[in-house]
Amino acid sequence: MSAPLIDPFARRITYLRVSVTDRCDFRCVYCMSEHMTFLPKRDLLTLEELDRLCSAFVRLGVRRLRLTGGEPLVRRGLPTLIRSLGRHLESGALDELTLTTNGSQLATHAAELYAAGVRRVNVSLDTLDEVNFKTITRWGDLRQVLGGIEAALAAGLKIKINTVALRGVNEDEISRIAEWAHGLGMDLSLIETMPLGDIEGDRTDQYLPLSLVRARLAQRWTLEDIPYRTGGPARYVKVAETGGRIGFITPLTHNFCESCNRVRVTCTGTLYMCLGQDDAADLRAPLRASKDDDLVTQAIREAITRKPKGHDFVIDRRSAKPAVARHMSTTGG
């Protein structure tokens, strides 16, 4: 029962991303529509069920666990779950327990996260301009996010900034964001917008290939390819002039599906073997059908046998519909 998870393409699954809620206090234009309908709270896994599910994956060889959303820090009681999962760090079964957040709640929770065993968080931030920030997030307050980042750094957390590159929106800011992040000792990951869910707009207007972004940055700075990895799909360069790192996550221009070691679980207990495919497995039913974890372990193993070779993301005028109907906030960022 404890043998590692190996998919049909001999990839070992060691990285699990778990959405603890589909709710968010922002409405980012590339992620969701402004008037979202969220899941009834009764459909969500309880904190105890999330703990059981994560622990089952850890026993099956998952070494990195990332909690996501929506915005995970709006989930009531989340610090309790993090403290409980921290036992796997103490035992050595888990290498890393991390979080992806929009930063809005970090000032409140940073010290608590560190005390619970979290050492690194990713903060999604697409602009340093207050007006542009309000436009992108619809509901967000840049000053609140920057205050959260400051509190997290003061608490001892390492931070990586995640920035979605958006044509005509923030493409002229990317070098500024990199300089700001590197000046505070933070890495930056740039991400291509992904065709997930209906966003009440045309993603072809937003899509900015990172091959173009990198070429522009190379005109300004000296970029050196480096082997640094964090367990995810980013490929990093070091910027000689700033001393910092920039990662490129390129699901459209150059995917890295051949080395994918990740699966995702939603807040309702649905396992997606690939972010860009619809095939999924229900883990909630076997989780609730028995007090031990034999049934859910069997369900996980069966699902991994169906993990596809890669996704089918495409953004062009002929493919106006999203690759999959669900939003990123449903699957887990």
Image (tube, rainbow, N blue to C red):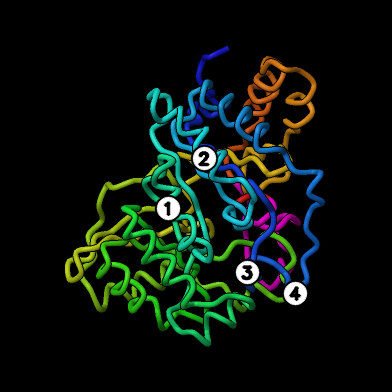
The answer to whether mark 3 and mark 2 are in CB contact below 8 A is no
Q: Point out the frontmost of discs 3 and 2.
A: 2
Residue located at (24% from left, 63% from top): 244
Does the magenta portion include 316?
A: yes
Q: CA distance from mark 1 to mark 4?
A: 30 Å
Q: Nearer the viewer, residue 169 or 152?
A: 152
Image coords of residue 310 (percent x, y)? 58, 43
Q: Point out the frontmost of discs 4 and 2.
A: 2
Q: Nearer the viewer, residue 157 or 228?
A: 157
The kind of residue on which mark 4 rests is Glu
Q: How many marks?
A: 4
**Left or right for 224, reference 160:** left
Q: Point out the frontmost of discs 4 and 3.
A: 3
Image coords of residue 228 (percent x, y)? 28, 47
The first of marks 1 and 3 along the sequence is 3
**Left or right for 182, reference 208:** left
The first of marks 4 and 3 along the sequence is 3
- Considering the numbered disc 4 on the image, is that residue within a helix, a strand or a loop? loop
Residue on which disc 1 sits: 121
Residue on which disc 4 sits: 200
Q: CA distance from mark 1 to mark 3?
A: 18 Å
- How packed is label 3: few (under 14 Cα within 10 Å), some, or many (20 or more)? many
- How packed is label 2: few (under 14 Cα within 10 Å), some, or many (20 or more)? many
Q: Is residue 172 above or below residue 1?
A: below
Residue located at (66% from left, 40% from top): 272
Q: Which span of residues is magenta-colored?
A: 311-330
The kind of residue on which mark 1 rests is Val
Q: Which quadrant of the figure has residue 184?
A: bottom left
Q: CA distance from mark 2 to mark 1?
A: 13 Å
Q: Which mark is residue 82?
A: 2
